Amino acid sequence: MKQAIYGLILYVFLMIPPVVHLSESIMSIHMHMQMPLLGIAGMFMTPFLQKKFPSFFKKWNENGIPGIILFFIVFFYWLLPRAMDETLILTHVEVFKFISWPFLIGVSLRDSWAKLSNAWKNAVYIIVSVAYLGMAWLYIFSPDQLCNNYLIVEQRTLGWGFLLIAFCILLYFVQTLFIDQSQYE
């Protein structure tokens, strides 16, 4: 229960207008901090939601694959440069961000992760890191401004952030192949 309260506090904090304005004013903070923190808030609230609606999660996401597919659909939408631009311009897209990141990405990822086999978990690591490498290439080497509301220098900084995160995910993935995780559980 404490975890759900922490998630709710984080969620409400991220929705405070000065925090929203500050986090959306810098492109890399918007993409690499605000959005993942919204997902983490949803992850914190997941056990409470699982206890409140156990039949829904059992019926809807029995083996974890539907939840991961939902995670990827919404996650890939938010990787689009246009989605970030529309968040700053259109109110309904911003509302969708504050609903989709915690409740579609965070909850579905946490609910699915324990149910997935190791092969599916490895696939998630690879897909996310390849997507981040692609986004790094796009944001770093694009000669044009991809987001109208951000400068090209911010776009390149975001690309380098994507590259660093992709490298870290791949490093963690390779590490899981060589270290037996059951010894540390």
Image (tube, rainbow, N blue to C red):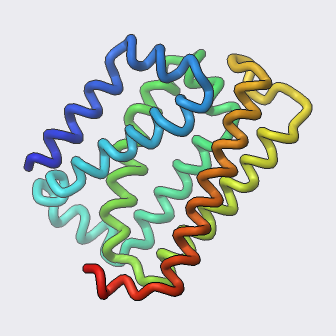
**Which residue ends up furthest to the top in the rendered image?**
18
Q: 61 above or below 47?
A: below
Q: Residue at x 76, y 34 (%)?
A: 156
Quadrant holding the C terminus: bottom left
**Quarter-wise, where is residue 19 in the image?**
top left
Q: 170 above or below 29?
A: below
Q: 46 above or below 175?
A: above
Q: Is residue 72 left or right of residue 158?
A: left
Q: Residue at x 37, y 50 (%)?
A: 106
Q: Is residue 124 left or right of residue 148?
A: left
Q: Residue at x 70, y 20 (%)?
A: 150
User: Whole-percent x and y of residue 97?
Assistant: 46, 33
User: Whole-percent x and y of residue 96?
Assistant: 45, 32
Q: 125 above or below 149?
A: below
User: Whole-percent x and y of residue 63?
Assistant: 35, 78
Q: How many marks?
A: 0
